[in-house]
Image (cartoon, rainbow, N blue to C red):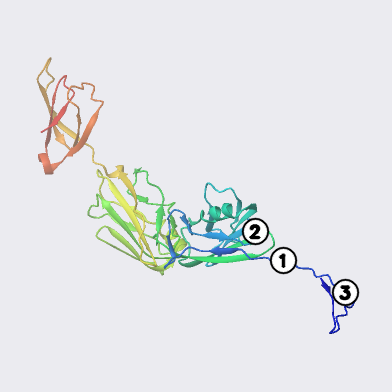
Amino acid sequence: MAWTLTDVEGLTGPSKTMSLAVQSVNQLPVLTMGTYTTAATYGEGDTAIVLDNQITLSDADHTTLASATVAVTTGFESGKDTLLVGAGSTVTSSYAAATGVLTLTGGATLADYQAALRLVSYSNTAEDASTGKRVMTFTVTDGAGGTATGTREVQFSTVLDGTTLTGTVSSLTSVAKSALVQSTLVVTDPDSAMVSKATITIATGCASGDVLTVSDMHPEIVASFSGCVLTLTGDSSKANYQAKMRTIRITVTSGDIERMVSFVATDSTGKSGNTLSRSFYFTALTKLPTVTSATSVPTSGGTVTITGTKFWTHVTQPGDARGDRVDRMHEYRGDRCGDQAGVHARRGCGKLAHC
């Protein structure tokens, strides 16, 4: 720049010059979030949800961006909350599960970054995640270091899962009159540290004199047995209930029939879980059949009559002389055929019929 002065008589003095350096000012990028009246909602067990598919980006003096981040800045749970850029993005991304920060890098265009940010999704697969609000903060950075931010809220809701019981489900045949029911039972519950109740029932085959007993360990868990049902009550830890339920024993006074014993537990939130069941057969008390008489065997055709008590009949499919396909089995006792059960068999048919 040059300055020249002229006086009133028209005389001009020497010119003076000065240099002026003009520096440009970086125009910050503009990040505009979509217009939403409520927070996004996410429930335990849901699939991933896209946070904002309406994001727009602009920058007055840049056509590219250097980087962007999306972070869980409120309500974050390490190792549980997850952010991900969906398929189709051309921008490189990585997620730090320990800090909850998704980072997008590379000198890509504004359009590429805008498309990538519209694909960012949130998910949480944990069974014990905390309910409440999560705030997701979006930040974009241009090549000159200028930044812009925006936020999106997610309202997280959990589902109470109840107490889960796992153990042995295969049936047990015992030559004794008593057996432990679930000696390897395991109690789990992602939503509660305490169990308040357990119900153990002889659900099938309960007979007069059958009983369920349990040890007196952990006296805060009170046991009572009535009408084929053993009830444990009282708040205690999952480990204590597990230890106590492993000592439950069934004792019977008669054989011949299947007993099925079922377990259900309820946690301190009032939520019950699955039913764990196991069948038992006690052969020590099984009454063997007694034959009192039988007619002679015909040389061909005809029938044979066998008379006795406590018979089991095996009914096979008609025409199967080998009798190797059993359809059903039934014990004939006094309630069906009187004290004497007659069983008739027609030779060569392979089918046994009851009296």
**In 3D space, how far apart are the residues under numbered discs 1 and 3 (Cα atoms)?**
29 Å
- Disc 2 target residue: 62
Give the position of the N terminus as an image quadrant.
bottom right
Residue 288 image position (x, y, % from top left): 23, 37
The amino acid sitting under disc 3 is Ser
Q: Check disc 1 and report its element: helix, strand or loop.
A: loop
Q: Are the residues tagged 2 and 3 within 8 Å (C-beta)?
A: no
Residue 7 in view (yes/no): yes
Q: Nearer the viewer, residue 67 or 2?
A: 2
Badge 2 or badge 3: first in the primary sequence: 3
**In 3D space, how far apart are the residues under numbered discs 1 and 2 (Cα atoms)?**
13 Å
The amino acid sitting under disc 2 is His
Q: Nearer the viewer, residue 309 or 79?
A: 79
Q: Check disc 2 and report its element: helix, strand or loop.
A: loop
Give the position of the C terminus as an image quadrant.
top left
Residue 240 image position (x, y, % from top left): 45, 63
